[in-house]
Amino acid sequence: MSADPLNSAGPPQRTPSVGRPVLDGEQPERVEVRRSSRRRRTVSAYREADRTVVLIPARMSADEERRWVGVMLEKLAAQEERRLLDDEDLFRRARELSERYFEGRARPDSVRWVTNQNARWGSCTPALGTIRLSHRLQGMPEYVIDYVLLHELAHLLVPGHGPGFWALLERYPRTERARGFLEGVVAAERLPHSPCPQRD
């Protein structure tokens, strides 16, 4: 089996960022615009660590860039508002997944988002029954978050990443798809100024 993407998220890419005008009462948001000569018409954006990356065609004017940055920031915010789970939702989701895939045997005492995990997607302390998910997962597809939750829930039952652990995770039908998604995110972050697929 290939390297576990949950343990190979890698540090966030450190590249110069550009800002946008800050409106009254609004907190500044770090925005990095990446221009690509291969990109003809499409514009996409995604969250990366503590910034938003907006991918645009190289030919765009400065005015078009400013307009599209605003459009994409609004689009991302709307997507995240629809998808965002708070800690209570996350805990409830973990219990549901345990019931569905592990006969309810994995019983976490707490499940929460954390902002200090930039090199891993999730972590678990079996002795305390605690599960922590990186805030970088927020806004990713639900099946990816479910996979990370199940990965950490499985650690409540099986320590390490031996055959028994992977046998548990194979009960989740989207395991390979979720692993592929996370591996793609990691690969994209390690390639400077590489266009990434549009996240809708």
Image (spheres, rainbow, N blue to C red):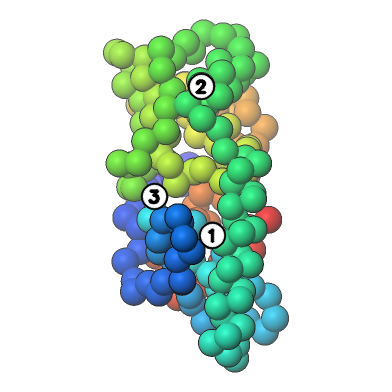
Q: Report the quarter where the C terminus lies.
A: bottom right
For the residue labelled by badge 1, is the local secondary structure a helix, a strand or a loop? strand
Q: Amino acid at mark 1?
A: Tyr
**Residue shown at 36%/25% (left/top)?**
124
Specify whether residue 197 is in view. Answer: no
**Residue 12 sits in which quadrant?**
bottom left
Q: Which mark is residue 9?
A: 3
Q: Is residue 85 above or below residue 18?
A: above
Mark before the other along the chain sequence, 2 or 1: 1
Q: CA distance from mark 3 to mark 1?
A: 16 Å
- Report which residue position mark 2 lands on: 88
- Report which residue position mark 1 lands on: 46
Q: Nearer the viewer, residue 108 or 4?
A: 108
Left or right of residue 7, residue 1 in this image:
right
Q: Amino acid at mark 3?
A: Ala
**Residue shown at 42%/27% (left/top)?**
112
2 vs 3, front mark: 2
Estimate the x, y position of residue 18 in percent, counting from the top left: 40, 74
For the residue labelled by badge 2, is the local secondary structure a helix, a strand or a loop? helix
Estimate the x, y position of residue 84 in percent, counting from the top left: 57, 38
3 vs 1, front mark: 1
Estimate the x, y position of residue 182 in percent, counting from the top left: 51, 49
Mark before the other along the chain sequence, 3 or 1: 3
Q: CA distance from mark 2 to mark 1?
A: 25 Å
**Residue shown at 61%/59% (left/top)?**
74
Estimate the x, y position of residue 104 in percent, counting from the top left: 56, 9
Marks 3 and 1 in Cβ contact (< 8 Å): no
Q: Is residue 47 above or below residue 118?
A: below
Mark before the other along the chain sequence, 2 or 3: 3
Q: CA distance from mark 2 to mark 3?
A: 25 Å
Q: Residue furthest front?
A: 24
Q: Is residue 36 above or below residue 169?
A: below
